[in-house]
Image (cartoon, helix red, strand yellow):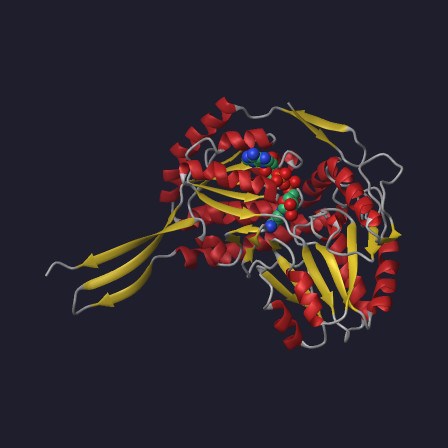
């Protein structure tokens, strides 16, 4: 049985039956039987089901957000924002998919009687193994375009977001997506591994680098398509020509939103020495103003961590930094209350020999390092095996572009951070992953192109 715990109260919410080898195998059989029928439906029929799903999501947003908060500890206003914003991502896919999936004629030569065409066939049966931190976002980035393209989806929500996974499946059914086409597989990593024992047509994974490496190995056995959206150690650089008050507030939000548990949360901040003191003071004031507490309250900005084990990771990062000479400006420890709460933590006088500046923290902990110029900032920002996002805050766009173009990241931000757009590809490089979701490329990724050569008989 899978035990679902409320991270704010530490109480058991429910126990759910987990999938096992037999039930997973049955679900694969059902998906295989259903997928050709779904793929043979018209695009309009598939799109109508997804439109209904989106409508139901919006209608039930309040209850869905409450469930998300109960099982992950996400502050309720942020849970509501996630559910509501998901509907706008679905709208993007619905606007674009028909055009992207339509056959393309790339040559029509009447004299030769030759036509060349590309059609976009679905991959077939795909596994969507997902994370808990934004289950609606990272799930829908995969399952919505995958379904629109005619695939069957075996959706394994994180064991820390199983109730949300079940809610999504119930909405899919109510929306008219056939039963075999969208199925949840419930359980922890062992159950995820069982899924990949089957020769599926692709695995689309969101999670940590460590698990992502295992997924790639498991997928290689069947030569299935692999897409990995992994962690990050995202950096921001604050130049000497900014208004520190404004930037400090925005950057603190980028580091601490969702209690720092975002793949693209700021995890490292570099500040030009000319504005360093003023920036740190303004940043600290913002962080000390964050309301920490019950995630069910509208005024709460920082809730508990979703997983108790991460408390130990954060404690180890703080003590390693302090042992190597860092200065703690606030936080640094668990809060003495029920629930997996860690105090918002700011460390300065940090450097890259410290784990807090190298390894993903995935919690409300940030290190701020002083730099003498743009060259030093760029060199430090590049000093990571991860490559998800990077941001530069400056009055000059060309200065930001000069620095960001040197960095091996999937996303570059000028005067913003921790931002995802459905219109742009979302991808990580190096330890942050391979492949992409979102944008029109994130629709095509669920298809395999077929090359047609039509030669009229002469
Ligand atoms: P995780 O790697 O612990 O788990 C992710 C999923 O993999 C879960 O569903 C888990 O049950 C499953 N799993 C674990 N072992 C498995 C195995 N051997 N075979 C198959 N499945 C297995 O990650 P998490 O804690 O759920 O998520 C946090 C991580 O995800 C962070 O590193 C975060 O940065 C990353 N993330 C990345 C993005 C992105 O878009 N790049 C988005 C959200 C989260």
From the viewer's perspective, tell me whether residue 424 is left or right of residue 250. left
Q: Evaluate whether residue 328 shows in this view.
A: yes
* Figure quarter occupied by ligand 1: top right
Quadrant the C terminus occupies: bottom left
Q: Quadrant of residue 244?
A: bottom right
Foreground of the two, 351 or 286: 351
Foreground of the two, 171 or 28: 28
From the viewer's perspective, tell me whether residue 156 is left or right of residue 451. right
Foreground of the two, 389 or 294: 389
Q: Residue 87, image x and y in percent? A: 60, 51
Q: Evaluate whether residue 59 shows in this view.
A: no
Residue plotted at (16% across, 59% down): 456
Residue reaching furthest to the left: 458
Q: Quadrant of residue 245?
A: bottom right
Residue plotted at (89% across, 37% down): 336
Q: Quadrant of residue 224?
A: top left
Q: Is residue 80 above or below residue 193?
A: below
Residue plotted at (53% across, 53% down): 437
Q: How many marks?
A: 0
Q: Is residue 371 above or below residue 43?
A: below
Q: Residue 305, image x and y in percent? A: 76, 41
Quadrant the N terminus occupies: top right
Q: Is residue 415 above or below residue 336?
A: below
From the viewer's perspective, tell me whether residue 441 is left or right of residue 42. right
Foreground of the two, 379 or 405: 379
Q: Residue 379, image x and y in percent? A: 66, 64
Residue plotted at (78% across, 42% down): 316
């Amino acid at each position: 049985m899978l035990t679902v715990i409320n991270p704010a109260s530490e109480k058991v919410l429910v126990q759910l039956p987990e999938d096992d080898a037999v039930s997973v195998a049955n679900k694969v059989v059902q998906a295989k039987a259903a997928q050709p029928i779904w793929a043979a439906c018209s695009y309009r029929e598939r799109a109508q089901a997804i439109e209904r799903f989106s409508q139901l999501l919006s209608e039930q947003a309040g209850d869905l957000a409450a469930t998300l908060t109960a099982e992950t500890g996400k502050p309720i206003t942020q849970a509501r924002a996630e559910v509501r914003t998901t509907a706008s991502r679905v709208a993007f896919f619905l606007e674009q998919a028909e055009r992207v999936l339509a056959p393309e004629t790339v040559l029509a030569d009447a004299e030769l009687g030759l036509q060349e065409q590309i059609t976009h066939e679905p991959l077939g049966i795909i596994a969507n193994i997902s994370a808990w931190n934004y289950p609606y976002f990272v799930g829908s980035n995969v399952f919505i375009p995958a379904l629109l393209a005619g695939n069957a989806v075996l959706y394994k929500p994180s064991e820390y977001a199983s109730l949300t996974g079940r809610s999504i499946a119930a909405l899919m059914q109510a929306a008219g997506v056939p039963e075999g086409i969208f199925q949840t597989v419930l359980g922890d990593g062992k159950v995820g591994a069982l899924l990949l024992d089957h020769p599926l047509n692709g695995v689309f994974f969101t999670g940590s680098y460590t698990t992502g490496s295992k997924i790639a190995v498991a997928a290689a056995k069947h030569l299935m398509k692999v897409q990995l959206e992994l962690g990050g150690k995202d950096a921001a650089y604050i130049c000497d020509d900014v208004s520190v008050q404004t930037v400090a507030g925005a950057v603190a939000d980028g580091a601490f939103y969702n209690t720092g548990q975002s793949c693209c949360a700021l995890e490292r901040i570099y500040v030009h020495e000319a504005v360093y003191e003023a920036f740190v003071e303004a940043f600290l004031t913002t962080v000390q103003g964050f309301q920490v507490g019950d995630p069910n309250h509208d005024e709460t900005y920082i809730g508990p961590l979703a997983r108790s084990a991460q408390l130990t990771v954060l404690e180890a990062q703080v003590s390693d930094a302090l042992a190597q000479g860092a200065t703690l400006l606030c936080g640094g420890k668990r809060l003495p209350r029920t629930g997996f709460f860690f105090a918002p933590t700011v460390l300065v006088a940090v450097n890259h020999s410290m784990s807090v500046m190298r390894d993903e923290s995935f919690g409300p902990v940030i290190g701020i390092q002083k730099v003498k110029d743009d060259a030093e900032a760029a060199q430090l920002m590049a000093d990571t095996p991860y490559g998800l996002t990077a941001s530069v805050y400056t009055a000059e766009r060309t200065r930001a572009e000069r620095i960001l173009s040197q960095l091996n990241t999937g996303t570059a931000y000028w005067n913003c951070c921790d931002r995802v757009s459905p219109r742009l590809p979302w991808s990580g490089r190096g330890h942050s992953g391979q492949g992409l979701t979102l944008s029109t490329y994130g629709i095509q990724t669920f298809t395999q192109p077929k090359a047609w050569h039509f030669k009229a008989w002469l």
